[in-house]
Image (spheres, rainbow, N blue to C red):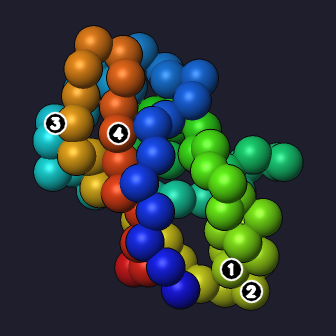
């Protein structure tokens, strides 16, 4: 288990508009991608040098969440950690 800070890739602006700093997003596998999900849908994809490790942990049943730390236009920074 670990904590990772990253910027969401391929942000969904319709969902990003609804987010606020401090919001907690669900981290999940969506096909071959790891995504951060909000109530309104997928906010964006998780990119990280530790992506293989994140996938392995999710596949093994470990739940992760992503807390929104900054929003700068379409750039959303999240901190990923175990739920």
- Of residues 10 and 29, which is closer to you in this image? 10
Which residue in the protein does label 4 denote?
77
Residue 64: image location, x then y, percent = 48, 71
Does 55 appear above or below 72?
A: below
Which residue is disc 1 drawn over?
Answer: 57
Contact, mark 3 vs mark 2 (Cβ under 8 Å): no
- Read off the residue under disc 3: 20
Q: Residue at x 35, y 57 (%)?
A: 79
Mark 2 is surrounded, within 10 Å at the Cα level, by few (under 14), some (14 to 19) or many (20 or more) other residues, namely few
For the residues labelled 4 and 2, the Cα–Cα distance comes to 25 Å
Asked if one can make out residue 39 in the rendered structure from this viewpoint, the answer is no
Looking at the image, the residue that sits furthest to the front is: 49
For the residues marked 3 and 4, what is the alpha-carbon distance in whole angstroms?
11 Å
Q: What is the CA distance from the residue labelled 3 to the residue labelled 2?
A: 30 Å
Q: Residue 70's quadrant in the figure?
A: top left
Which of the two discs, 3 and 1, labels the residue nearer the N terminus?
3
Query: How far apart are labels 1 and 4 at the CA level?
Result: 21 Å
Mark 1 in CB contact with mark 2 (< 8 angstroms)? yes
Front tag of 4 and 2: 4
Is 59 rendered above or below residue 76? below
Residue beneath label 2, please?
Answer: 60
Q: CA distance from mark 3 to mark 1?
A: 27 Å
Q: Is residue 1 left or right of residue 66?
A: right
């Amino acid at each position: 288990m670990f904590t990772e800070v990253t910027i969401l890739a391929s942000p969904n602006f319709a969902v990003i508009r609804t987010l606020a700093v401090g919001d907690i997003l669900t981290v999940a596998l969506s096909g071959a991608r790891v995504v951060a999900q909000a109530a309104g849908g997928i906010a964006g994809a998780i990119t990280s040098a530790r992506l293989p490790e994140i996938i392995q942990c999710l596949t093994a049943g470990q739940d992760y969440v992503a807390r929104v730390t900054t929003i700068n236009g379409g750039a959303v920074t999240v901190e990923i950690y175990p739920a």
